[in-house]
Amino acid sequence: MRTLKLKAITSLALIALWSSCTESPFLSKEEVHQTVDSLELERYPFHKVKNVVAIIDNDVYYFSRLHSLPKRLTQTPNDVKTHVKLSFDRTQIAYQDEDGHPVIIRADNGEVIETLTQFAYIDQMDWAKDRMTLYMLSDREVMTYGEPLEIIQPNSHHPWDEVKSFSINSIGDQAYFTQYYGEYQTRLRFYSINEDMDDENVSFGGDSFDYIDFYDNTGNFLVGYSDPFEDGFAKIACVQSYGFYYIYEWGEERMNTPAFNPEHEVLLYGTLENQVYQIKGVYLGTEAYQSDGYSDILTKVLEDYTSATPVYLDWVQ
Amino acid sequence: MKKLIFVLLVALFSFGASTAQDNRISISPELNIPLGKLAWSYKPSMGIQLNYARIGDTDSKITKEVGFSVSYTSLAPLADTLYFVVDRGGVGGAGIGTAVYSSFKMIHFKGNFDFGVPIVKKKLALNFGFGVGYLQGIRDILFEDSFGSMDGVSENVAWATLVPKVGLEYKMSKNFSIATYLSYSIMIQMGSSDPGSLAYNEDTGKFYHYYTPGISLNYYF
């Protein structure tokens, strides 16, 4: 006679698993703790983050891994620096100096390659994701520096129309957020240099955004909502396949330069916590939503690297 | 089981009916040493065996014995609590599991068929043979994990056994001898794999094994 007192279905699977073992599943208490810690560390999403550049106290730092000691690439803390961007091949870094000119430095030693004094008043800039081209949105025009990059310039009807944001992926899809004169909401317009695509997306479920960054080549991108009363973004969302639906979303005051990696489902940004600027990571994996709920989503703040000035960052995994 | 007892009794009473015969009773302290999966949870533990054998023609070169035995052992768990890793996958999916095993109490009945080959006449003999039996095993197991899952199993299960054995026997006098032996026990859980059967047991056919060195004190009459 065999009696089975079932108290939790999940344990049955566990016993079945145990029964199929060829070696004893039992370990010492210390070994079990070590194995669990090792598994958690291996899966800890921030442990996998590589190649992050950040401006901390007006100097550029390169984190080969987020948990490792960064390399300080500049030694000029008195010179204001903003909007740092790492090239797709991780060899060059661009940032804006206090006059708003892009400065290109080597990513391995910080040596200045060139200061692009011909460009200024830049609203947004980034490296192309497949070539050594720096593109810059200034007023209502996208300019480039480096290898040729075909750009379809934004549509503008009125001198007071405002192009808020621009992004391009490496298959030629590009998008603009535009605030047309007389309209309350921004419009997101997609173009493609390879396909006949000219679509416009006005609303994301009622949310209004004004920043876009393609993070892959499948129509997935990050949108951000700039806080009108504070610096930085108040909300970001990741949208799938040029659609309207969010895969991930995250809201927090003063998020600066958000960077998202879909493979690791991690969002990084500069933040202001306890009166100091820091780098913050958020794990937005679906498991986090399922198990803990929005308020308990795993986050990490790099408390060892605080800054008196806003932190700007970029991440090219 | 009934067939086994019947065969044993027929063998016992028809065995060597017209030749010189002995009977032997034995008491054997023994050490049961778990192997394989049984050893994952239990450590070697002492047991005791009582044995009766009817010995065939004692004048022949090879003596034949038929008998039966009953033994009891209580395998002690390796530790009060055993620990294992629970892995549900994903971030935060690794946790700690614990298993608490009670002692595994085993009452073992078996019929024995043995042979004795004299090495030194009337003094030293090599014994070998096998037993076929029935074992009732009783134990409790409790699993818990750090995610809050809990599961308890209370077993009181029948096992069929097959026990080959080899040993050396030294005869101290006409009536007394001492023997050492090593047996290997295979346990196969009994029951029906048919979910509609009253004897349904999802673990039918489950296999354990252990070996047992022992010393027996024998009295011939």
Image (cartoon, coloured by chain):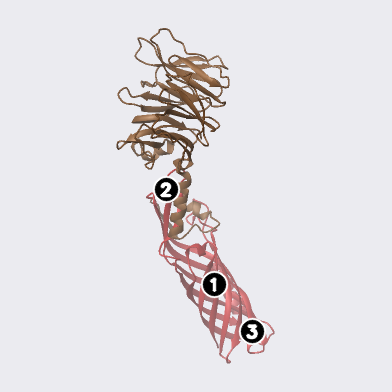
Chain colours: A brown, B red
Q: Quadrant of residue A294?
A: top left
Q: Residue at x 50, y 17 (%)?
A: A143
Which subunit holds the residue at mark 2?
A: A
Q: For this rendering, which residue is in front, A61 or B88?
A: A61
Q: Nearer the viewer, residue A306 or A7?
A: A306
Q: Is residue B48 left or right of residue A269?
A: right
Q: Which residue is mark 2?
A: A9
Q: Identify the residue under disc 1.
A: B110
Q: Amino acid at mark 1?
A: Lys
**Closer to the camera, B130 or A238?**
A238
Quarter-of-image position of residue B99: bottom left
Q: Position of residue B129 (x, y in %)?
A: 62, 75
Residue at the (54%, 27%) spot, across then down = A129
Decide: few, some or many residues near mark 2? Use Cα within 10 Å; few <14, some 14-19, many ≥20.
Answer: few
Q: Could you give the CA–CA distance between mark 2 and mark 3, rounded to whole angstroms?
A: 56 Å
- Quadrant location of the C terminus of chain B in the rendered image: bottom right
Residue at mark 3? B125
| Image height of A317 relative to A146, above or below | below
Kindly check if marks 1 and 3 are in contact, taking CB atoms under 8 A apart as contact.
Answer: no
Residue A148 % position (x, y) = 58, 19
